[in-house]
Amino acid sequence: MGNKSFYDLDYIIEINEQRLEQYANAHQKSVERFTTLLVIYSALCIFLVPIIQTLFFTKEQWHWSYYCSFYVFCILFSISIVNCILLLSPVSSDVLRAPRIYYRELKENYEEAGILPQKTDTIIKNSYIVELENAINKNENKLQRKFAYYNRAFHYAILACIPYLHCIWMQINYDKKTISKSEISTDLSSFTKNQSYMWKWKKKPKFKEIDEVMLTLVKYGGLGGVHPKDIIRVEPIHGKMYWFGFVPNKFQPKPMHEILLEQLRERKRNSRT
């Protein structure tokens, strides 16, 4: 403070003006604190929709603690929201009168009344100080209410986190159960499919159900998938080679047309039987 004295009216006017400016700045900062509340509210609303769907739109019956936690959370969260709205609500502001009222109107009135200029100056300064004090008192009350709204909104939001965490824990357990149930159902369906597939392979198939071409390939290993019985065996001509040429033997293999006729007759006999 130095050499300044509270008997000095100029110093009193100075500190009152500074305090009024501080209250105006503090009032703006109290409104800016809404960003902190907004972060908390956004965190609380992440799981709010799935929790409501789980509690009220499913057929399952939940533990009583889940419902109680949700209702307690709703009450605390609602109180915090109401105080936040009051924090943001506009209030009536008190503005100082124009300075010309003091240095023109009041001064002229005192001069017309015959009061000395020095005393007139003191009286006008006192009037200005009274106006400053009234404005400071009103702004102080408004600022205290804003701080009270913010504190209640913040504290109730923090308290709402306690039942909200319990609701999140119940919701996570519910999600795990649903995931495990879906996995079990998929595993069961795949297991039954595999079992039915293996059972089909274990059954002894009938002769009619087997592909004859595949049986021929597996059993006889014929070239190109042809049955060995269908192959016409052609024997070479037997004979002797002399100096003048080749002389065939008396007994030779049957000609080709006779072999084909015999095979056709054999097939007809097999088809009849």
Image: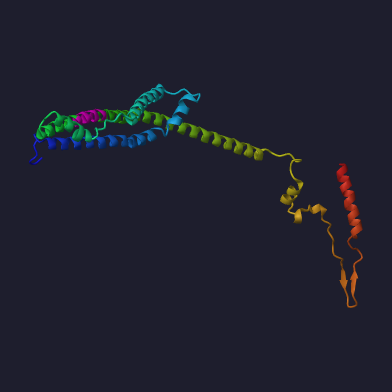
132 sits left or right of 155 in the view: left
Where does residue 171 sit, x and y in percent of width and height? 43, 30
Q: Quadrant of residue 211?
A: top right
Q: Residue at x 37, y 26 (%)?
A: 78
Q: Locate residue 139: give its quadrant.
A: top left
| Quadrant of the drawing holding the N terminus | top left
**In this rendering, would 104 be left or right of 50?**
left
Chief SS of the magenta region: helix
Can residue 138 be found in the magenta stretch?
A: yes
Image quadrant in which you'd find residue 102: top left
Front-lying residue, 142 or 172: 142
The one nearer the camera, 57 or 126, is: 126
Q: Which residues are magenta?
A: 131-142
Above or below, 231 against 131 in this view is below
Q: Residue furthest left?
A: 3
Residue depicted at 13% across the width and 37% down the height: 10
Q: Nearer the viewer, residue 123 or 82?
A: 123
Q: Which sits in the foreground, 175 or 20?
A: 20
**Residue 29 lies in magenta, yes or no?**
no
Q: Position of residue 261 (x, y in %)?
A: 91, 53
When the figure is inspected, residue 84 is found, relative to residue 198, above or below; the finding is above
Give x and y (percent) for residue 18: 19, 38
Q: Is residue 261 left or right of residue 8?
A: right
Q: Position of residue 161 (x, y in %)?
A: 34, 30
- Residue 126 visible from this viewpoint: no
